[in-house]
Image (cartoon, grey):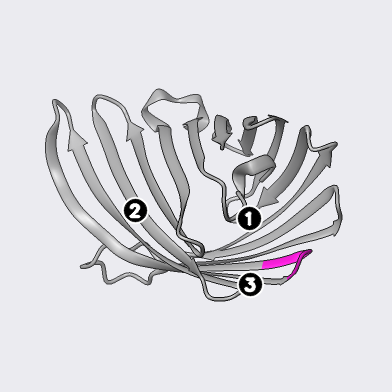
Amino acid sequence: MGGCLVPDEHARQVAMSYRSGFVTSGLATARLDASFALGERGRMLAGYSHFGDADYAEHQALLGYSMKIDSRVEVGVQATYLLQAVGDGHYENRQWLSPAATVRVSFSPRLQAVALAGTRPWDDVRPWRMHAGLAYRAVPRLLTLVEVESEERWRLRLGAEYCYRQLLFFRAGFATAPLAVTAGAGVYYGSYLVDISVESHPVLGLTPQISLAVCF
């Protein structure tokens, strides 16, 4: 949420983030993502993430493509390659995750809907992950979100973000199953966005995250 993290159709974006799960090095995730226009209606997305430490690590590489069907509807596909390593770098598992399909519908300048299905390994018999969300901007400075996710169980997320002069962003939200409370703030200046957020788990504690995005 915030700033150029939802770029316009002509923008290019590079984003880096670091998330420390419950302030534990073994649960930290570092990400690098890039997005850029491809033709008048297409957009490419590429990303890499690293989770874990020297004892156990997961590497994921993502490649996706989306295309505008018309002024209101955008569809896309993405595939992710997973590499799991244990100890001194011995690779225990390499596999393609099942492709994910996304649909974004803009009902009006104030209301958008997004749905995603997929992201399961090819040979996994468990149900695919499903995700759907609505973003509504009642007034220019306030964005509200409702998200529903189904994997092993259903999870609901609610959030709101307030924008001050297209410069500062403040947000808060919560999620169920398990219960989590989130808060964050960002500074958007020119083509740069710096964002800091934290998620609070009632038992495991805090998970901070910092992100830097460049749009050009």
Residue flagged by tag 3: what amino acid is it?
Ser
Instruction: Please say if 162 is above or below 80.
Output: above
Residue shown at the point (63%, 55%) measured from the top left: 176
Of residues 58 and 38, the one drawn nearer to the viewer in this rendering: 38
Per the rendered image, the range of residues in magenta is 108-112
Q: Secondary structure at mark 1?
A: loop
Residue 94 in the image: x percent, y percent?
16, 49
**Which residue lies under the disc numbered 3?**
71
Residue tagged by mark 1?
176
Identified at 51% across, 30% down, the residue is 22
Query: At numbered mark 3, what does the secondary structure look like: helix, strand or loop?
Result: loop
What amino acid does circle 1 point to? Answer: Thr
* Vertical arrangement, residue 66 with respect to residue 4, above or below: below
The residue pinned by badge 2 equals: 63
Report the mark closest to the observer, 1 or 2: 2
Residue depicted at 56% across the width and 33% down the height: 214
In the image: residue 36, left or right of residue 201:
left
Tell me the amino acid under the disc marked 2: Leu
Locate the C terminus and report the quarter of the image it occupies. top right
Q: Residues within 10 Å of mark 1 (few under 14, many from 20)?
A: few
Above or below 79: residue 212: above
